Image (tube, helix red, strand yellow):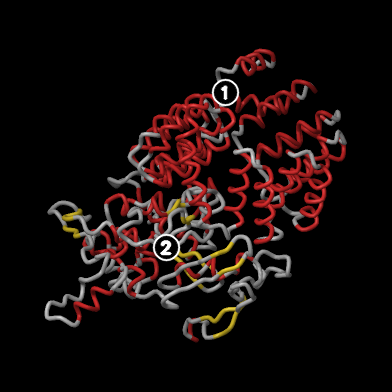
Amino acid sequence: MDTGNGHMQAFNIAWDTRTKTNGGQRWFHLQPNEPITSEHPFFWQRHFQNWNSRCAECHTTGYEKNYQIDTNSYATQFAEATVGCESCHGPAALHQTQAKSDKFDRNKGFTQSLAKPPVWGFSPKDPIANLVSDGNSQYMQQCADCHSRRLPISDKTQNVSKRPAGYHDLNTLSLMSSELYFDDGQIKDEVFVMGSFLQSKMAKAGVTCSNCHNPHTGKLKFSGNQTCTQCHNATTYDLPEHHQHKMDTPGAQCVNCHMPARTYMQVDDRRDHSFVIPNAEVSAAINSPNACLDCHQTEGLSWITTQLTAWRSGKAKPTLQQATKEHWSNIHLLPEAERLSFAKQKQLETSPMVAAKLLEIINRQPSQASVSLAIEQLSSEQPLIRRAAIDVLRNLPPNKGYQYLYPMLKDPVKSVRFHATSLLASWLSQMPDTLLPELAFALNEYKTSLLLTADFPSSQLSLAQLALATGDAILAQKHFEQALIIAPNLPVAMLSFADFWRQTNNQTKELALLEKAMVLHPDFADVLHQYGLYWVRKKEYYKATEWLVKATELEDAQPYYAYVAATALDSIQRTSQAIDLLSAANKRWPQQTDLLYSLALYADKTKDKAAMKISLDELQVLMPNNPQVQQWLQKYGQ
C-alpha cells in the first residue's frame, strides 16, 4: 500500500501459496503470537514492513531506490515487478538484436554470462567427486546478492562494466553472531543461505548453487537423494550402512539429516546449507538444534547419543566423542588457555566463515595472544577473516591500533576497507596529522557507502557516529533524529541518541529519551542498563543499582551487565547480594574471567569460602599465571 511520499508498505497478512493439502490456500498473519500494536516494529506502517528498503531490491528487476533523506521520501523505479532475466544476466539489448540475426545463440548477448557451472568427476577410489574444471565464478555472486544477510556498500545500478565485480566489494556479509546463528553455526534468524553455505565443506571444495539447483526455477535438479549422489557415490552413501535407516523413509533422505529445515514466516521451511553432521553431544552442550530430534523428539538427546555412539564405534570415521572434540564449536567449552591454540589450528582447517567466528569467540576474553593472532590474520587471503581480525583490534589503544589498521585502508576488497575505516573513524582524534589526508579519502568512501542505505536507521546511526568523530555535533544530531524518523521507537536509536545528549551535557533530553525507552521497551536489557548508568552519574546509587540488577535478569542480558550490577551492589554494602548475582551469572555465562575474578574478590572480602572455591576452581584453569589468583590459591589452600 502507498502511504505517501513514495513509501510502499507490505501488510503482515499474507497468502499461503502452498497447496490446500499442505495447509495452504489461506490468508494468515506473519506474527500471530505477538501483540502488533502501532508501536511494534513489525506494525505494517513501520520501517521493517517498508517495501522500498526491505523487499524491492531482490523482488524486482532494474530496481532504483531513489531515497531522499531531507524529505524521507522515495521515487522508487523498477523495470519488472519480478525477478526477470536481466536480474542475473544484465541488460539484454544485444541479446534481442542477435535474436533477429542468423547468428543467434540463446546463451549469448548478455553483459553477464553464467553458462558454465563447475564440472565434477569421480576418481576410482574416492566416493566423493572432485572438481574437474572450474565454472563461472559469477554464479555465487549473482545468487548471493539476494540470498544472503548483508548490507549493500556499492551502487548496483551502475553500468556492469564500471561497478565492482566481487560480492565483498558490493556487500558486507553478516557474520555468525549469536542473534543470527546458533553456537555451532546452524541457522537461527533469517540469513538467506549464503552465510550458512560458506561454512560448508561443499563451498570450500568449489560447489556452486547451480550444481544442485536449476537457476531458473530454483528447484533441485533431481528428486530424492539424486541431487546429492551427483557427487556423493550412491553405493557408499545412499545405503542403510551409512544413514542407518530403511531405504525410502524420511530418515534415509540426505537433507533430513544434513540440511534440517527451520520454519520462517509461519509457513516457509528453509533448509540449513552448512551441511551439518548431527551430533547430539554438541547440541546438548551448547543448546543448538539437532536434526535427529525432528523425528525422535520423545527419545531425546541422551538416547540419540547412545545410538550415534554405537553406529560409529569400530569404524574408520571418528567416534562420536572424537567428532565432538574436533568440532569447531567445541571452543565454547574449552578453558581460555586452550582456546587460542584450538582457534589457530582451526583457522587452517575450517571455512573462512567459521574462522572469522573463532576470532570473535577468542576476543570475548581479550589477551595479547588473541590480538597477536588477529594481527597475523590481517594478511589472510580471505576477506571475511580480515574483517573479523579488524574487529578484534577494537580492544587496542588507538595510538597502537591505528598502526595495524591504517594499511587496511588499501585493502583490495571494499568490505574490508569499510570495516577498517569504521573503526579508524572512532580513533580519528588520536591519529597523527600526517595520516589524515589518506584517511579523508577512506572516510569519503565509507560515507558514500552508508548513504546507499540512508533509509536504514542503522546507517543513520553510523553516519551520526562519523559526524561526531569529525567534530560535527550538529550534523550528528540530524542523523540521530533521522534514524528516529525512519524507526521512531527503535531501542538502539533511542539509546544512541540519549548517549549523544550525555556527551553534549544535555541531561534533560538524555533522561527524556531514556524514560521513553523504559516505557516502550521495559524488557530490553540494554535499556534498563543504560537507565541505571544514568542514575550512577547522578549519584543516586540505590536507584541505579535497582535497574542495573534488573537488567541482568532479562533474556537479552550480557555478562558485562552482571559485572557492573555486582560492582554497584558492592558499592552500597550489599556484597553478599553481589556474590549471589555473580554466582548465578557464572552458571548462565560460564568461564567469564571478569565475573569469576569479581566473585573471588567479593568472596575474599566477605570470607565466603564456598563462593571462593567456586571461583578459584575455574580461575586456576583460566588464569593460571595471574599473581592475584596465585595469592588466593595459597591463602585458601587450593
Decide: is 481 above or below 268. above
> How many numbered tags mark residues here?
2
Which residue lies at the image location 27% right of the left edge and 64% below the top edge? Answer: 211
Which residue lies at the image location 53% right of the left edge and 45% below the top edge? Answer: 285
Residue annotated with mark 1: 623
Residue 142 left/right relative to 445: left
Q: Quadrant of the C terminus?
A: top right
Decide: is 466 above or below 196. above
**Where residue 51 sits: x, y (%)?**
55, 71
Could one spot residue 306 in this view of the protein?
no
Decide: is 436 above or below 236. above
Amino acid at dot 2 = His
Instruction: Give residue 53's quadrant in the image.
Output: bottom right
Q: CA distance from mark 2 to mark 1?
A: 43 Å
Q: Quadrant of the N terminus?
A: bottom right
Whether residues under marks 2 and 1 lie with C-beta atoms below 8 angstroms apart, the answer is no
Instruction: Give residue 145's quadrant in the image.
Output: bottom left
In-front residue for pair 100/259: 100
Amino acid at dot 1 = Met
Tag 1, which secondary structure?
loop
Of pointers 2 and 1, the one earlier in the residue sequence: 2
Residue annotated with mark 2: 147
In-front residue for pair 390/614: 390
Tag 2, which secondary structure?
loop
Could one spot residue 576 in this view of the protein?
yes
Label 1: how many Cα within 10 Å (few below 14, some 14–19, many 20+)? some
Label 2: how many Cα within 10 Å (few below 14, some 14–19, many 20+)? some
Q: Nearer the viewer, mark 2 or mark 1?
A: 2
**Where residue 548 sits: x, y (%)?**
77, 41
In-front residue for pair 527/27: 527
